[in-house]
Image (cartoon, grey):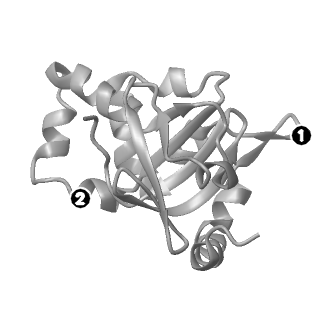
Amino acid sequence: MKLFPILGTCAALVFAPLAIAGHHEEGGAMKQQTVVDIAVGNPDFSTLVAALKAAGLVDTLSGAGPFTVFAPTNAAFEKLPAGTVETLLKPENKDQLTAILTYHVVSGKVLAADVVKLSSAKTVQGGEVTIKVDGGKVMVDGANVTATDIAGSNGVIHVIDSVIMPK
């Protein structure tokens, strides 16, 4: 099935280490990591992880879920106007940061094969993200999906190239 013909190949090459990193040994048995564990283990998500910590969402997103996380990379955060991330990470802006981060999360495990059939999805924040498929590319509120279906024990991560903002 060709959902993301070019994306699929690139994502497989770039994110193959994530699939392996999604597991760790515990008492001799392999235990799948949560979506937060996967993000923590990937340096491309260090800004997202710092934001999740500042917003107090690490425990929530480490919970049972399932969650679908549209995860912006560090490069996505760098596209924001200068000083935006630093301002959002301040304790007095925790509510705004929480709203932005929960706008990147959808309840349930929505795999790429399902995402491409949707025109929108309700976020944990309460708003709706617009989903658009155009020529094999998938966009969520204007952000390009660059990798899909990174599975954790409590959900799935789809990587995006921009931070999306609640309307």
Q: Is residue 13 left or right of residue 27?
A: left
Residue indicated by mark 2: 78
Give the foreground label among 2 and 1.
2
Q: Is residue 37 left or right of residue 46?
A: right
Residue type, mark 1 in image = Ala
Question: What percent of the width, then of the height, locates residue 122?
Answer: 47, 31
Residue at left offset 40%, top offset 41%:
129
Residue at left offset 50%, top offset 37%:
121
Q: Earlier in the sequence, mark 2 or mark 1?
A: 1
Question: What percent of the width, then of the height, locates residue 113?
Answer: 69, 55
Answer yes or no: is residue 42 visible: no
**Which element is circle 1 on?**
strand
Residue type, mark 2 in image = Glu
**Which element is circle 2 on?**
helix
- Classed neighbour count for the residue bearing mark 2: other residues with Cα under 10 Å, few (<14), some (14–19), many (≥20): some
Residue at left offset 38%, top offset 61%:
161
Answer yes or no: is residue 69 visible: yes
> Looking at the rendering, in which quadrant would you find the C terminus?
top left
Residue indicated by mark 1: 29
